[in-house]
Image (tube, rainbow, N blue to C red):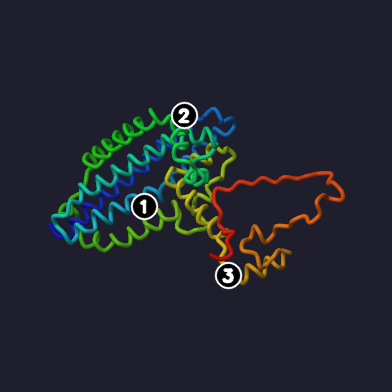
């Protein structure tokens, strides 16, 4: 079997895995909507649209998973005849299926608590006490039975993938008619498919769908159901990146001292805290204040150090 024949036949397996992932995300989406269907009233008619938009968005997630299998399993097979393509492809997809099964089982109680799929609360939790997180997972997320059930679900999906890849017909390149035409059209067709998947069932950004534009329906449940767990986690990552970009301030010591002085602080102080400390010189205020306002703030992370110099 020549190199192109190996590529042609293994590419079919990658495409079958891609379709399988689209089906898995759709089943997860239907199950999620069914679990919280009590939140739907007049929005039941929007369920088909939510499934369609969700499928379009999941093209990106399924495409990325299939692409990784394609790069590390199919492409090396073109050069290395003995490359264990099937084992590597199946192993990668099996790990991914177990991971997303765990994510799906986590999403169910997560939505009940936060009324959303994965969001920025994951970042806040990452800076919390590990023991407290574990206790919360056991008490609020039913970790002790949900995690084993998620593993069973992942194994079942993996077994389904094995059947899917083995039983769906795969056309041998030797049986293909007009081989030269197939070879000539292969790359253009793949390029068009990649663009279609990249833009979520469209061919440009204006008509695409992403996590920022996915909330197109009236129901919060359906809008969250449109996001598969991969896209929900990407939302967390993207929001974190944007917050870091806005809040990370690069400023020199000289510039910081100028701003402190302009704000009425002591520019010669060792830290920002001491720069704005004002000590009452009188032993007692001449006139007692009528009101005292206490402002309490909480933040999981400080982006600007109060230390002016180290």
Q: Residue at image x 13%, y 55%? A: 82
Please name whichever residue, 236 or 273, is drawn nearer the observer in this view of the structure: 273
Depth-wise, is mark 1 or mark 2 nearer the camera? 2
> If you read the primary sequence from the N terminus, does the residue marked by circle 1 or circle 2 appear first?
1
Q: CA distance from mark 1 to mark 3?
A: 41 Å
Label number found at residue 64: 1
Does the CB distance between marks 1 and 3 fall below 8 Å?
A: no
**How many marks can you see?**
3
In the picture as drawn, the residue positioned furthest to the right comes out as 287
Q: Is residue 32 left or right of residue 309?
A: left
Image x and y of residue 252, in percent: 58, 70
Q: Which residue is mark 2?
A: 139
Question: As drawn, is 137 to the left or to the right of 253?
Answer: left
Nearer the observer, 248 or 155: 248
Label number found at residue 252:
3
Q: Are marks 1 and 2 in contact (CB under 8 Å)?
A: no
Disc 2 is placed on an element classified as helix
Coordinates of residue 172 in the picture (x, y in percent): 17, 50
N-term-proximal mark, 1 vs 3: 1
Question: In the image, residue 307 lies at what x, y percent?
Answer: 57, 61
Front position among marks 1 and 3 = 3
On the image, the x and y values in percent for residue 175 come to 16, 52
């Amino acid at each position: 079997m020549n190199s192109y024949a190996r590529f042609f036949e293994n590419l079919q397996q990658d495409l079958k895995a891609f379709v399988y992932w689209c089906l898995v995300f759709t089943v997860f989406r239907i199950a999620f909507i069914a679990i919280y269907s009590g939140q739907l009233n007049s929005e039941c008619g929007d369920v088909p649209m939510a499934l369609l938009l969700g499928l379009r968005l999941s093209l990106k997630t399924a495409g990325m998973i299939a692409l990784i299998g394609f790069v590390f399993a199919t492409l090396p097979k073109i050069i290395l005849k003995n490359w264990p393509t099937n084992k590597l492809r199946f192993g990668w997809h099996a790990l991914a299926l177990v991971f997303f099964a765990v994510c799906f089982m986590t999403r169910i109680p997560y939505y009940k608590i936060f009324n959303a799929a994965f969001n920025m609360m994951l970042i806040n939790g990452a800076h919390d006490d590990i023991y407290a997180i574990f206790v919360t997972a056991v008490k609020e997320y039913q970790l002790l039975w949900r995690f084993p059930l998620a593993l069973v679900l992942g194994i079942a999906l993996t077994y389904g993938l094995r059947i899917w890849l083995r039983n769906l017909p795969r056309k041998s390149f030797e049986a293909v008619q007009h081989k030269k035409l197939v070879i000539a059209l292969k790359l253009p067709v793949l390029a068009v498919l990649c663009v279609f998947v990249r833009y979520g069932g469209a061919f440009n950004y204006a008509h695409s769908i992403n996590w920022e534009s996915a909330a197109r329906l009236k129901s919060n449940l359906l809008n969250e159901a449109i996001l598969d767990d991969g896209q929900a986690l990407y939302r967390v990552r993207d929001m974190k990146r944007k917050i870091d970009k806005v809040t990370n301030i690069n400023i020199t010591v000289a510039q910081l001292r100028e701003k402190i002085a302009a704000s009425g602080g002591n520019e010669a102080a060792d830290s920002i805290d001491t720069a704005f400390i004002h000590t009452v010189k009188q032993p007692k205020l001449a006139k007692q204040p009528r009101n005292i306002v206490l402002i309490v703030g909480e933040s999981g992370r400080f982006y600007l150090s109060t230390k002016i110099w180290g």
